[in-house]
Amino acid sequence: MELSERKKKILCAAVEEYIRECSPITSGGIKDTTLLDCSTATLRSELNTLEAMGFLKQLHTSGGRVPTAQGYRYYVENLLEEGSATSGQLDEVKDIITSRTSSLNDIVSKIAKVVSKATNYPTVVMMDGYENLVLSEFKLLPLIEDKVMVLIGTITGYITETIDVKASVQDCDDASKYLTNHFKGETLGYMIENIEQFEKGMHGEIAAFQAVVNSLIHGLKRLNKQRYLDVRREGSVKLLEDNIEEGKKILNVLENENELSSMLEMSGKGDVEVTVGDENDSCSVVKAPICVNGKQLASIGVIGPQRMDYAGIASALKVVIDSLKDIKGE
């Protein structure tokens, strides 16, 4: 729905004032905020029109107005078209990302925690793009009770997998060298799809550690089908302090893995996407894909009520995803 520039400015100012103050919007408050060169009576008329169009609603006949879900959505659409990341935000994320000696799950968890603390809202990261991880090295270590620990280095961090197979130190060393030599620089998905062809072409080379390789591939196929969710609840206390009922709804969502997975699905329409909760469902989400080398590895979402700081959160997520985009394969 097209709005005049004045109506657009008034609506965006109204939404931002309500997010900031959590109190109904008045023509006087808008005049102070926007510094528009028009009378209070004109602003009152514009607010009446925005209400009639469904962007605002009046809680009481003599009271001010608050944004509707439609109003929030219009604000968010304009925000995502015009917004850009603020330099200097979330420098801690860049430090986490540049350290690739941590496990991938630890890196994901640390990023979620930093974003949650920075935005003051609960944050969720969903890992579901293991097949796009670019491999750098393999290290296999024999354990007791016929188990082998596998450390898989990637350009973003390492992942671990324990496989049930009996293997000697020599078998593990040979398998480590073989896998690193043939799959360094390739994706995990490529390795899973093509390992059988490599086995056929080099059967003699891997015959001694065939069982190790087979067990590893079975474990990686299982890992590739999994979704890893990391939920950080920093900011939950503030939600309960602001509005107990809204806070409870959001905390209930954080306990539901299926609902979280659905909320974090990306449509591919943009770097940052926003879903504004309906009037009866106060849960909104600002989310973004986490991509490395142009491939999506995960998605990150900040969960909150309708009245959340969309601009600040979108900017914070933009910093995160732009920092990750800078990572290149080695």
Image (cartoon, rainbow, N blue to C red):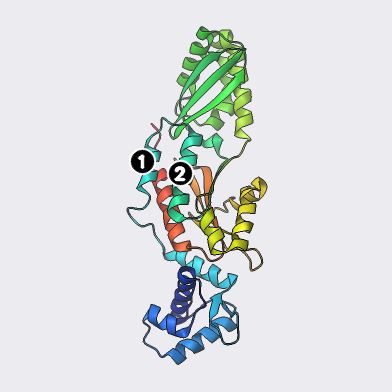
Quadrant for residue 32, please give it. bottom left
Residue type at mark 2: give it: Ile
Between 256 and 79, the one nearer to me in the picture: 256
Does 190 sit left or right of 5 as displayed? right
In the rendered image, the residue lying farthest to the left is 88
Q: Secondary structure at mark 1?
A: helix
Question: Residue 326's x, y, as percent?
Answer: 38, 43
Does 280 sit left or right of 301 as displayed? right
Quadrant for residue 95, please give it. top left
Question: Residue 16's x, y, as percent?
Answer: 46, 71
Q: Circle 2 sits on which residue? A: 111
Between 54 and 305, the one nearer to me in the picture: 305
Position above or below: 269 against 36? above
The quadrant of the image that shows the C terminus is top left
Between 250 and 141, the one nearer to me in the picture: 250
Position above or below: 142 against 13? above
Which sits earlier in the primary sequence, circle 2 or circle 1? 1
Quadrant for residue 228, please give it. top right
Residue type at mark 1: give it: Asp
Q: Residue at x 54, y 19 (%)?
A: 149
- The answer to whether the residues at label 2 and label 1 have Cβ atoms under 8 Å apart is no
How far apart are the alpha carbons under marks 2 and 1?
A: 10 Å
Q: Circle 1 sits on which residue? A: 95
Q: Secondary structure at mark 2?
A: helix
Question: Residue 151's x, y, as percent?
Answer: 50, 23
Between 279 and 137, the one nearer to me in the picture: 279
The quadrant of the image that shows the N terminus is bottom right
